[in-house]
Amino acid sequence: MEQRTGCLICGLAIVYSEEARDLACAICGEVVSTTAACEAGHFVCDRCHGLEAVDLIEQFCITTELDDPIAIACILMRNPAVRMHGPEHHFLVPASLITAYCNHRGEPGRKGELLARARERASRVPGGFCGTHGTCGAAIGTGIFVSLITGSTPLKRQEWSLSNQMTARSLMAIARHGGPRCCKRNSWLAIRTAVTFLEERFSVSLPVEGAVRCGFSDINR
């Protein structure tokens, strides 16, 4: 569910100590002197508390060392800046995959450029696209991911094919589940489909969480 109270990373209660200590923000990495952290030790600075959804996604993905795209997506989804439904998921999907892919391959330095390009491409996919254009932004997000890691263009052969195959496979997984829309469900389905595709076509095996237990159903409208 959305974290209206508690830690923005894990949802646990915030604990206040008598003495300040230096902690790194779990989103941007900046070290700040603070008396507040959650029971698991997570701290989020004031600036990151106020970030808009796409800024939050980009900032967290640049700094995190996680290589599980489902875990990355779930952390981002728990932040109240990421609404239950909305076009921010069109960026969240490729951002989670780019981050996991680069971290897993020991190439974190590539993330900044790839995330910026994914953000720009995802911004062209409006909210509600799934209901009016016959394709879901989460599925498009996986195609954006593959197009970026392969360097696809309209004139490439294999790269162009792989990018479109990726979108098609994600979209089929989403479509088979049936409506109505759910941005959280569709994002998880798209990411899992992309993980399988990466292993099959690129021989890259990303670690992923087991079955995701949805914590958003009570606010799904």
Image (spheres, grey):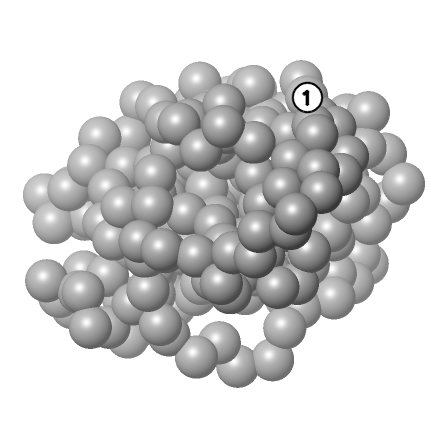
Which residue type does callout 1 highlight?
Gly
> Tag count in the figure?
1
Q: Quadrant of residue 114?
A: top right
Instruction: Measuring from the top left, give residue 75's x and y in whole percent.
Output: 52, 54
Along the line of sight, the residue nearer the viewer: 159 or 179? 179
Residue underneath mark 1: 112
Q: Quadrant of residue 5?
A: bottom left
Residue at the location (17% across, 65% down)? 220
In the figure, is residue 45 to the left or right of 138?
Answer: right
In the figure, is residue 73 to the left or right of 157?
Answer: left
Along the line of sight, the residue nearer the viewer: 66 or 153? 66
Is residue 191 at least partly visible in the picture? Answer: no
Instruction: Measuring from the top left, give residue 201's x and y in whole percent.
Output: 72, 56
Q: Quadrant of residue 121?
A: top left
**217 relative to 40, above or below:** below
**101 relative to 61, above or below:** below
Residue at the location (34% across, 39% down)? 81
Instruction: Measuring from the top left, give residue 159's x and y in whole percent.
Output: 64, 35
Is residue 203 at least partly visible in the picture? Answer: yes
